[in-house]
Amino acid sequence: MDRIIIKNGLVLDGTGAAGFPADVAVEGDRIVAVGQLESVDAEITIDASERVVAPGFIDMHSHADYTLPVWPTADSLLHQGITTVVVGQCGFSPAPLREATRESVVRQVAALLGGVGPPLPWDQWSNFGEYLGYLEQIGISPNVVPLVGQGVVRAAVMGYTAGPASAEQMRRMQTEVVRAMEEGAFGLSTGLIYPPGSFAAFEEPLTARWAQEEAFTSATFGAKAIRCDRRSPRPSRSAAGRVRRCRSAISRRRAKEIGARPDAPWS
């Protein structure tokens, strides 16, 4: 295994401490030493004089899940120092896809992407795990933290039909969320100003989050709910209370609020 030494840089280690001059030794995907490493041999030496050496940046709101299947090297991210992306944002993720609604979902997502770049190989996956397996198969540069999108879950169950979901459809949405988390999703995102998420009654995102609670309870997942819109009117007090209880159950850390008291602002 090749050893790489990055020499003469100013190290910012991510702790908030002041930068300090040091060399950094890397083997494989691990940092193995930080300090003055003049006596350490390496197959590759990089001179970082007058440069900063820092941990990779995390892009907390990325849609790279729609580009990685065709641009797995993610050059535009790495050139900015981004090594981890949180994808599946705004209620959209490349999976799950179901046979009855697959064509309409793919068509709508392709339109949303605006025809930029090569078309995605949609035939390579249907389930969330198959999508992640495809990324692993082709080999990608960044680390990926995948979320499953509530909008795509809704579309998988009922297409882009407007109006509230039935009780049976909400049960199917719950099943899809639990399955996605079992297959590798880190949590759920919503985008309630974007179709089909905008068609959802307030109870539907809650139902999906309760599915997260089920997955969290059964498999000790550290589930995360990420909300990326502002929506009015605000929920009723009782609904807000359910959101707060749901949020505390599904996240090991405080999730960004998806609802609050009627007199509090949206997060």
Image (cartoon, rainbow, N blue to C red):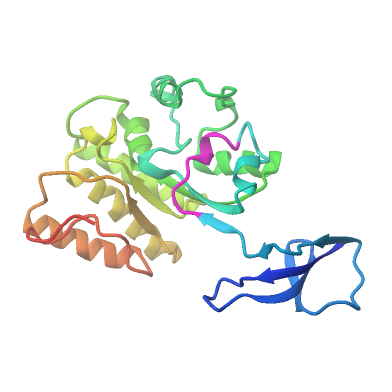
Residue range of the region highlighted in magenta in the rendering: 59-68
> Is 213 included in the stretch rendered in magenta?
no
Residue sitting at x 53%, y 40%: 64
Question: In the rendered image of this protein, does residue 181 appear above or below residue 14?
Answer: above
Quarter residue 56 falls in: bottom right
Q: Quadrant of the N terminus?
A: bottom right
Quarter residue 109 falls in: top left
Can residue 74 be spotted in the picture? no
Estimate the x, y position of residue 78 in percent, counting from the top left. 64, 48
Q: 192 or 201, which is in the foreground?
A: 192
Chief secondary structure of the magenta portion: loop
Judge from the rendering whether residue 237 lies leftward or rightward of residue 96; answer left or right. Answer: left
Judge from the rendering whether residue 247 lies leftward or rightward of residue 44; answer left or right. Answer: left
Quarter residue 198 falls in: top left
Residue sitting at x 51%, y 49%: 183
Can residue 180 be spotted in the picture? yes
